[in-house]
Image (cartoon, coloured by chain):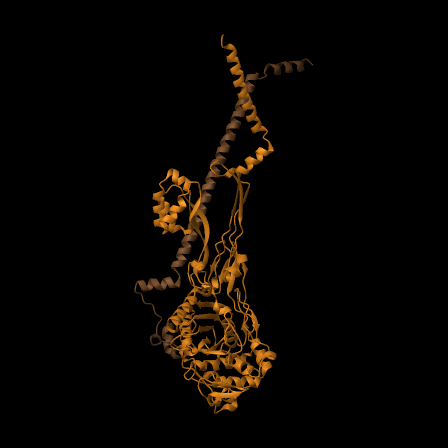
Chain colours: A brown, B orange
Amino acid sequence: MINRQRVRSHKAQVRIPFPVVLANILVFVAVFGLSYVWLCARCDTLGQEIKRLETVQRETRRRMINEQDRWSSQLAPANLDRALKRHNLAMHLPNEQQIVRVRNGAVSPSATLAYNK
Amino acid sequence: MKYKGRTVFSSVVITTVFVGLGVRLAFLHLRPSPEIMARIETARRLEQETRGPRGRILDRNGNMLAVDIAAKHVCADPKFIQQNGDIRAVCDALSSQLSMDRNVIWAMLNQPDRQYVRIQKFMREETIQPLRAMNLKGLVFEDVPIRDYPKGVLGAHVIGYANYEGVGSAGIEQRMNSVMQGVAGLRISQKDGRRREIYGTRTVNIEPQPGADVYLTIDQQIQHFAEKALDNLLAKYHPKAAWAIVQNVRTGEILAMASLPTFNLNRFSTAPAEWMRNRAINYTYEPGSTMKAMVIASALDCGAVRTTDIFDCENGAWFYGGTTLHDSHPYGRLTVADIIKKSSNIGAAKVALQMGNAKVYQSLRAFGFGDSTGLELPGEDAGILWKPDRWSKISITHIAMGHEVLVTSMQMLSAIGAIANDGVRMRPLIIRKVVNSKGETVLSPQPQVLGRPIRPETSKQMRRLMARVTQPGGTGTQAALPGYLVAGKTGTAQKVNLEHGGYYHDKFMASFVGFLPVENPAISIIVVADEPQQGGYYGGTVCAPFFREIADQTVRYLRIPPEGFTTEYVTDIENSGSGEESISD
């Protein structure tokens, strides 16, 4: 019984004074509040960054499609014909007289052998 | 001391006012009324619905034919410009950059009570780039999607167009509208005082889904060949209209479908309605002699005649059923093979009479006449083939030479394709596949057999008989292509006079339909000219050369190997007992 009383009185002696507790609480609240504000600001910054990147992505996609469209337009057969004409590049398919036809039976075995060698 | 009472009073009043304001402020922040909350919510709420881009249209090799691109509406705030800018400078800049009348722009901007006017709609990015660089105050560039057709007029009638609301209104754009339309996206969020979205308050964010891409069976290069050939035809013979189709014989895939006059898809709203008509599928006409190929094929198939049977062609005029049938050139006795080669009306009529009404009708139905082919394009006509109970005594003779029957070019090509394809009629295909935004193929139409109007043996016979049409002495020699054996049939028909009945004597439909190579057909082509004005009117004169032009370029482009140009098919009349033609090399 006496031992218990001693322990209690010892505990009473080491009690933290109220101002310190209050200060701790205030510091905790302040840190919590500042963290909250910092996180809020961080989220806001990230949100803005995401929004900016979304805009960049949309713009890039738009430009890509527009460029693909222009490229596709330039590759239109009629445009290619015009371009060839503009540069005096007359592209004609060969005439019948210009074609050399090699038939299966026309190649002699020796020629085939020479080719294979 | 004198003013102590007043000071106290003033202090009390000021304190009361401030306390009151404080209490009100506290109430507004801590316990706002639902009404105020709703008003704040409405003012802050940001709800954006974004349209999913429409799917693209591509040719069989993935070349883009239609795509949604980003364009801009050029808008202005007249009130702001009047207060903060120089209205004259803005007017001058807009007028020069947008090529618009300065007075029109002035009238738009000179409205100090308005804060929004739309100066020009659907401007391309590159057009407004200089304007944007000027950094003019009070101008706004609104994003808007616009349908663009990078190839302009190429394949205009097949591709069709989507209107400014993004709804397909013609051609493939119309037929495949439901799969090509994108799914709209939705974003619900809040905005700040400058109407910018507050990212952290975003509660719903559904991205828009692009529509599916449609790949056509069309090949842009072959389409170009066909359109160029028709341009040349138009320049030489000045018909009212001309059209052509190129088809893969084995699969039924349409490789090109061109129709002139045509229009630029990017300016569809300025084109006359008549130019937008796809005559290849919705113009019905009496085909003339091209119909003889189907009649004679059916007669051979059912055993009514043999290729070597001889018919008296009455020296060009035959009185039958109270009317006289004529040939363009007088012929005496002709074999069935030569009836096709020389395109004798009297001979074809007599062959049809050998078959009888019922068989002619059944066989022409089996070739697909009187029914649409089922092509995936809107507006296809079914043509007209009356039932035999509505025929007169002479109808069968007229139908045999391609009158009293209305067909579309697509039907005619499909029927000729059956002759080329061992007697198997394929459904024409225009859509190769549909691929959704995730890259999955959601539709891939497979070649489909529509019928077998003739046996393979008859098909082989007919291929050889039709090859003689393009050989010396035939009506379609101008369709002959060195290195290849071309089978075909010419067609020249007087046009029906709808006003006074009967036929015009000076208005013709000229056509040539054929396929190549004869022994292993790969492609079939039809070329039709409506009312050639000068230089001739026969199918063999007007259309055959342009058939050859298209065929020449297409076989080389598709690398279809030649099959030996010295082979010639002749019918040995002397040895008619064998009943089969012989081949001489």
Residue farthest toward the right in the current orientation of the protein: A1
Q: Is residue A39 left or right of residue B133?
A: right
At which x and y percent is residue B39?
56, 35
At which x and y percent is residue B282?
51, 68
Q: Is residue B300 visible?
A: no
Q: Nearer the viewer, residue B510 or A104?
A: B510
Q: Is residue B266 above or below residue B44?
A: below
Q: Is residue B576 above or below residue A3?
A: below
Residue farthest toward the front in the current orientation of the protein: B500
Report the residue at 40% width, 61% height from top. A76
At which x and y percent is residue B426?
54, 71
Q: Nearer the viewer, residue B177 or B106?
A: B106
Report the residue at 45% width, 70% height from top. B243
Q: Is residue B575 visible?
A: yes
Report the residue at 44% width, 71% height from top. B242
- Count the marks: 0
Quadrant for the C terminus of chain B, please: bottom left
Q: Is residue B232 above or below residue A44?
A: below
At which x and y percent is residue B90?
36, 44
Residue farthest toward the top in the current orientation of the protein: B1
Q: Nearer the viewer, residue B399 or B452?
A: B399
Q: Nearer the viewer, residue B132 or B102?
A: B102
